[in-house]
Image: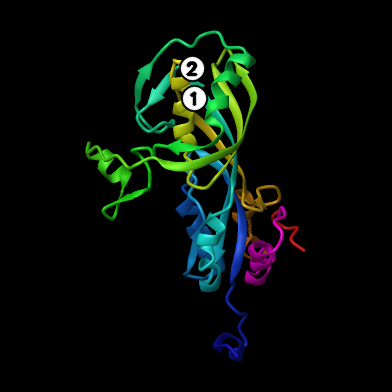
Amino acid sequence: MSQSALAGEPSPLCGVVLLDKPVGPTSFAMVRVVRRLSRVARVGHTGTLDPFASGLLTICIGRAATRLVPRLMAGEKEYVATLQLGVETETQDPEGQVVRQAPVPALTAADLEVCLVPLRGRRLQQPPRYSALKHQGKPLYYYARKGIDVTKPPREIEIRVMDNLGYDPVQQRLTLRVACSPGTYIRTLAEEIGRALGCGAHLVALRRLRSGGFLVDGALSAAELAGEDAAELLAGRLLSVEQILALLDGPMSAVHGPDFP
């Protein structure tokens, strides 16, 4: 019997909770919120979302749950991405300085499909200079911010689905749904598309809909985490380690925030 049970205290939380991260805070800021609400020190997430991005953030609470992080990170990811055509930035996203601008040609759906076809499937992708990928123990963005050019070898990725959800010719923005392997950089994909079109592009919005079998639908929102009953909501939405292992070891099926059987 645990010391907390002997003392008549509830056992520490241990499991996985699904959050819907809003635009603005960092992923680590969301981890800090969960750490405070759960009163558990060992808390981690299974894949960073940049501050400008929103959507599913899978949070592991407790030692047994955080041990599952590598397995949870291995699942396919699904996003809705919005690209700004005609503008490239140094970070391939809205947080960097503009480095190139070019006129955007008139584009039809057929033109865009011709561009997207060779970017689907299994292929190599060059990791971006501004990324958390490590080089000699430090993330690449550490070197990029110091003006040191470090190039990592291309890595194999798979873009299983890339659907054109619509192009706005006035704002010159293209919205895509992308289902891809872990390790795929959607920022880099945006730049690849822009260069294939001849006008450049960068990622201006990103929302993660799915990670492996976990869906953002029903995930805890930032508003719920800020409410008076946030700690109770968090405990009530917690998926146990046993439930997660059953999902990982069994036939893959979609899991909504509160709906795991």
**Badge 2 element:** helix
Quadrant hosting residue 111: top right
Residue beneath label 1, please? Answer: 193
Q: Find the distance from the CA under tag 1 to the CA under tag 2.
A: 6 Å
Q: Residue at x 57, y 85 (%)?
A: 4
The answer to whether 51 is drawn above or below residue 100 in the figure is below
Q: Looking at numbered disc 2 in the image, what kind of residue is underneath it?
A: Leu
Magenta-tinted stretch: 233-255
Question: Is residue 23 something that shows in the picture?
Answer: no
- Position of residue 235 relative to residue 212, above or below, is below
**Residue 197 - label:** 2
Frontmost residue, 85 versus 7: 85
x, y percentage for residue 204? 50, 29
Label 1: how many residues lie within 10 Å, few (<14), some (14-19) or many (20+)?
Answer: many
Which residue is at a point 24% across and 37% down the rendered structure image? 149
Residue 173 x/y as whole percent: 55, 21
Q: Position of residue 89 (x, y in %)?
A: 38, 27
Q: Is residue 62 above or below residue 209?
A: below
